[in-house]
Amino acid sequence: HGRSTYRYLQSSIEREIPGRRIESEWAYERDPFDFIHARYLAGSIKDFGRLIKQCYRYAKDPYSTIAFLASSLTENRSVKPGGWVEFQDEDLYPQSKDGSLNGTNLQRYYDEVLGAFEKAGHEISPGPKLEKWFKDAGFVNIHVEKLILPYGVWPKDSHLVSFSLFSPKTETYRNNILTFSHEENWCLESGQAEANGFEGAALAALTRFKNWSKEDVILLASQARADGRKRDIHSFFHL
């Protein structure tokens, strides 16, 4: 059932928005939405203001209590009022209250990579601007929730640690298959995902927009990852 649903949705997306160009003009006048949700589009969208205005045009009827409530019908809308639109996004530039991030390779990584995205015209810090964009689009009853997301291994609360510093340990053998505990699997998977993410996010941006060599990008990513494992660098992101 899950697979068939996914295929149907994928087919619908490709039919309605060829090539998944979300910033293209939408065409849903005859089939507007009850609820529109968007999450973590930082770096992917060039004009969030225009995108949110399109959401305003194609939202109808109350659906969720955790979102943004569309205002009354205007000449710019051909649908019923009351639709809900929810965006969740962040400021991709990390910060530190005590200045421990300043001058580090971790800071340099984000400055260089995000600068490349900005050079290409992409919005990389939409989170702090969402409220204004929603107001400009015509939404009312706007609810804003701001969160702080620590990055690295410095938080005392283990649930806020981004990844583990420790390597997974072999626990048992069953039918010649190596198994790990839940915590050990998380340690292995989160560490690998973090490693892939640092290189993956930087390679395209820096080689295409700043003419970096692949070797230099990999070196910077490795240095930034090393900084992320230092307990005396107290970096965090605003969501």
Image (tube, grey):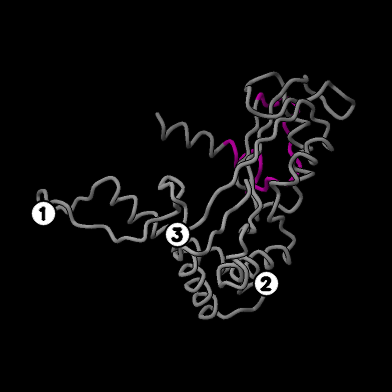
Which mark is first along the chain, 3 or 2? 3
Q: Which residue is mark 1?
A: 176
For mark 3, does the 10 Å Cα neighbourhood hold few (<14), some (14 to 19), or many (20 or more) residues? some
Q: Which mark is residue 194?
A: 3
**Mark 1 is on which residue type?**
Asn
Percent of width and height locating residue 51: 74, 42
**In this view of the protein, which residue sits in the foreground, 22 or 132?**
132
| Residue shown at 50% from the left, 77% from the top | 219
Q: Which residue is mark 2?
A: 209
Q: Is residue 60 above or below residue 123?
A: above
Q: Is residue 146 above or below residue 151?
A: above
**In this view of the protein, which residue sits in the foreground, 54 or 109?**
109
Percent of width and height locating residue 182: 28, 45
Task: Estimate the spatial distance between the alpha carbons at disc 2 and disc 1, rounded to whole Å.
Answer: 48 Å
For mark 1, does the 10 Å Cα neighbourhood hold few (<14), some (14 to 19), or many (20 or more) residues? few
Percent of width and height locating residue 68: 71, 29
Where residue 52 sits, quadrant-wise, is top right
Is residue 222 found inside the magenta-colored segment of the image? no
| Residue shown at 87% from the left, 30% from the top | 76
Q: Is residue 233 above or below residue 83?
A: below
Left or right: 142, with 12 as reference point:
right
Q: Is residue 232 above or below residue 24?
A: below
Where residue 142 sits, quadrant-wise, is top right
SS class, disc 1 = loop
Q: Which mark is residue 1?
A: none
Boundaries of the magenta span: 12-34
Is residue 205 visible from the viewing direction of this image? Answer: no
Which mark is first along the chain, 1 or 3? 1
